[in-house]
Image: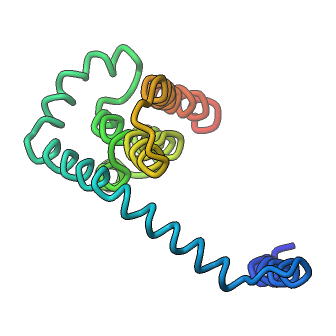
């Protein structure tokens, strides 16, 4: 099966062209129409993204992330989360690039095969950049009232943070001891 993997994309592209020819669809015009729509969507959500990136930069530069991390250490201990991953848990719902930088620092400092490194890895892979996603999708569709989206998404993130430590601890005890 491995030798056929590099044929998947050309086969899909050929299938699209053949399907379009059979249905009488002009592929190039359809592509240009989609690109134009995507560009206009990108322009419409740009202000929300700039505001989000500015807020993240101010949050990190002001030292608020460090203060919040220190204040949340008792809660992290109660939830059995390593305190070293608190900054990742705080930034992950806000900024993917900021969270990736913190994740890289954690991996560099503690290593990928440590408990902290594994919790950070699972956390990075099992949570979402909630505010960014809401800004992009709700901005593109021009929805102003998010209703239950934010509380539900942040609850999902919290569960992801907690379960990352639980899951790693469970597998660590089974396979690494």
User: Which residue is situated farthest in the right direction here?
Assistant: 22
Picture quarter with the C terminus? top right
Q: Position of residue 150 (x, y in %)?
A: 43, 29
Please tell me which residue lies in front, 124 or 120. Answer: 124
In the image, taking residue 68 as reference, residue 153 lies left or right, namely right
In the image, taking residue 135 as reference, residue 98 lies left or right, namely left
How many numbered marks does the figure carry? 0
Q: In the image, is residue 81 above or below residue 91?
A: above
The image quadrant that residue 27 belongs to is bottom right
Q: Position of residue 71 (x, y in %)?
A: 18, 22
* Colouring convention used in this rendered image of the protein: rainbow
Please tell me which residue lies in front, 42 or 68. Answer: 42
The image quadrant that residue 79 belongs to is top left
Q: Residue 107: tell me if it is visible.
A: no
Q: Who's the residue at 34% across and 37% down the image?
A: 85
Q: Residue 33: tell me if it is visible.
A: yes
In the image, taking residue 106 as reference, residue 127 lies left or right, namely right
Q: In the image, is residue 19 above or below residue 94?
A: below
Q: Position of residue 22 (x, y in %)?
A: 91, 81
Q: Position of residue 86 (x, y in %)?
A: 30, 33
Please tell me which residue lies in front, 48 or 161. Answer: 48
User: Which residue is situated farthest in the top direction here?
Assistant: 78
In the image, taking residue 71 as reference, residue 129 lies left or right, namely right
Please tell me which residue lies in front, 168 or 177. Answer: 168
Q: Who's the residue at 45% across and 43% down the image?
A: 138
The image quadrant that residue 1 belongs to is bottom right
């Amino acid at each position: 099966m491995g030798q056929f993997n590099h044929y998947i994309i050309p086969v899909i592209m050929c299938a699209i062209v053949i399907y379009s020819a059979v249905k009488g669809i002009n592929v190039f015009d359809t592509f240009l129409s989609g690109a134009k729509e995507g560009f206009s969507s990108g322009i419409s959500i740009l202000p929300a993204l700039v505001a989000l990136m500015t807020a993240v930069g101010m949050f990190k530069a002001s030292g608020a992330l460090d203060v919040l991390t220190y204040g949340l250490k008792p809660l992290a201990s109660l939830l059995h989360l390593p305190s070293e991953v608190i900054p990742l848990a705080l930034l992950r719902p806000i900024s993917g690039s900021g969270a990736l930088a913190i994740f890289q620092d954690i991996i560099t400092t503690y290593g990928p095969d440590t408990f902290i490194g594994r919790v950070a890895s699972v956390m990075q892979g099992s949570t979402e950049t909630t505010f960014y996603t809401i800004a992009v999708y709700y901005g593109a569709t021009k929805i102003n009232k998010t209703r239950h989206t934010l509380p539900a998404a942040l609850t999902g993130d919290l569960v992801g943070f907690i379960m990352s430590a639980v899951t790693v601890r469970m597998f660590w005890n089974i396979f690494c001891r």
